[in-house]
Amino acid sequence: MVQINEVKDTQTRESRTAAHTHIKGLGLDEHGIAKKVEGGFVGQSDAREACGIIVDLIKSKRMSGKAILLAGAPGTGKTALALAISQELGPKVPFCPIVGSELFSAEIKKTAALMENFRRAIGLRIKETKEVYEGEVIELTPEEAENPLGGYGKTISHVIVGLKTAKGTKSLRLDPSIYESIQKERVSVGDVIYIEANTGSVKRVGRSDAYATEFDLEAEEYVPLPKGEVHKKKEIVQDVSLHDLDVANARPQGGQDVLSMMGQLLKPRKTEITDKLRSEVNKVVSKYIDQGVAELIPGVLFIDEVNMLDIECFTYLNRALESSIAPIVVLASNRGMTTIRGTDDDKKSPHGCPADLIDRLLIVRTLPYNQEEIKTIISKRAVLENLNVTPDALDKLSLHGINNSLRYALQLLAPAGVLSKTAGRSEITSDDIEECEILFLDSRRSIKILEETKGYL
């Protein structure tokens, strides 16, 4: 007898840790009050509670076209707050994160790139009721007829499909075009399928679980026998963004001749979508919403480093916020009084935003962390990276968080872990941190060396 053994994968998958892997939500209780340490957050109670109110307003659809500014020093958790807002909203609400400088690196105009991201952040949930025939295939017989064009060949005139459900069976006489769809889906007797009555499209759901056996070697997905009648009405829900609709309508619909095909190939890959096309899409969307077929889901557009935008982008942003279909815009800036790109150097504006936009914003402030909070953040990050840190090393790292920056303190964790492992220790000690300080400079010491050394660089 041939021996067959299953090879089990002994290698464990190592989880990748990014800058905000530990963020799981805003960490609020049922009354919207921030817990001290929850959801990956430490401190920032006022900012988290403010974001909690924003999440409630977004869920109740009373926040469309409004904008929020997260303002605070670098490393105080602005991006983490935006990410937490998206996690609180859930996967069904669109969340589109961009950086201010992205708009200047696009192949299209910066204002068009800004509007494209606006449209990505607006979802449309289309509900459609379709008539379908669903069941397990018990018969699949193509019926042939003489070729009307003459000759010896025969053509399929129609196909008879028998479908069975828990409530009964039905035999259907289908068009030969549906038989082609059945062949493409590789449907055979014993498969569970559904056929759309309007379009005639066929979808193979899986193999009926009546055919599943203990010794089955097929890598097949088994599904239960459908309940109810063979012919039924089914509600199908589809989630798309307005940008998806724009792209679908902007695609050139050329003919099948060689010239039109060549024209499509020679077209640039990224074509600009006009405002006229967007307004036409908006009209159709509004009609669907009025009919009750579709539902608009305003999502979140998060623009980090908003001070990188120029005056043209800001004026366009003002106009976009006033449109009838607009998402919630969350901006983030770590600047105080600074010059707006494209304006006079001597004129400063708060957070790098013009005065007319600042008036529209709800500003949420993030505060610097104290030493105890920094200790908690470092210890939580160490747990995430599977590192053990001694109390002395934790104190040393927290001092770096106060004197230099929290980011520098967190960045020392991984190399210190490597050094402690090389030395044969299971915990990171203060000696490992001191060695890391020698190997890796912080920004202040690096600037001091550059100032003291002539001819350096």
Image (cartoon, grey):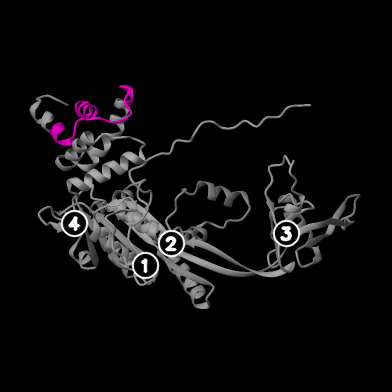
Instruction: Give the foreground label among 3 and 4.
Output: 3
Q: Main secondary structure of the magenta part?
A: helix
- Circles 2 and 1: CB atoms closer than 8 Å: yes
- The residue beneath circle 2 is 93
Q: Which comes sooner in the sequence, label 1 or label 3?
A: 1
Q: Which comes sooner in the sequence, label 2 or label 1?
A: 1
Q: Is residue 359 left or right of residue 294?
A: left
Q: Is residue 370 left or right of residue 180?
A: left
Give the answer, above or below, for where 58 lies relative to 247: below
Q: Which comes sooner in the sequence, label 1 or label 4?
A: 1
Magenta segment boundaries in residue numbering? 421-447
Cα separation, mark 1 vs mark 4, equals 25 Å
Dot 1: within a 10 Å radius of its alpha carbon, few (fewer than 14), some, or many (20 or more) residues?
Answer: many
The residue nearer to you, when weighing 427 against 190, is: 427
Cα separation, mark 4 vs mark 2, equals 28 Å
Query: Under tag 2, what secondary structure?
Result: loop
The residue nearer to you, when weighing 330 against 279, is: 330
Q: Which comes sooner in the sequence, label 3 or label 4?
A: 3
Cα separation, mark 3 vs mark 2, equals 33 Å
Q: Was residue 444 drawn as part of the magenta stretch in this picture?
A: yes
The residue nearer to you, when weighing 158 against 377, is: 377
Q: In the image, which disc is placed on residue 225?
A: 3
**Residue type of the residue flagged with mark 2:** Val
**Residue type of the residue flagged with mark 4:** His
Q: Is residue 107 left or right of residue 68?
A: right
- The residue beneath circle 1 is 58
Q: In the image, which disc is placed on residue 351?
A: 4
Q: Was residue 37 drawn as part of the magenta stretch in this picture?
A: no
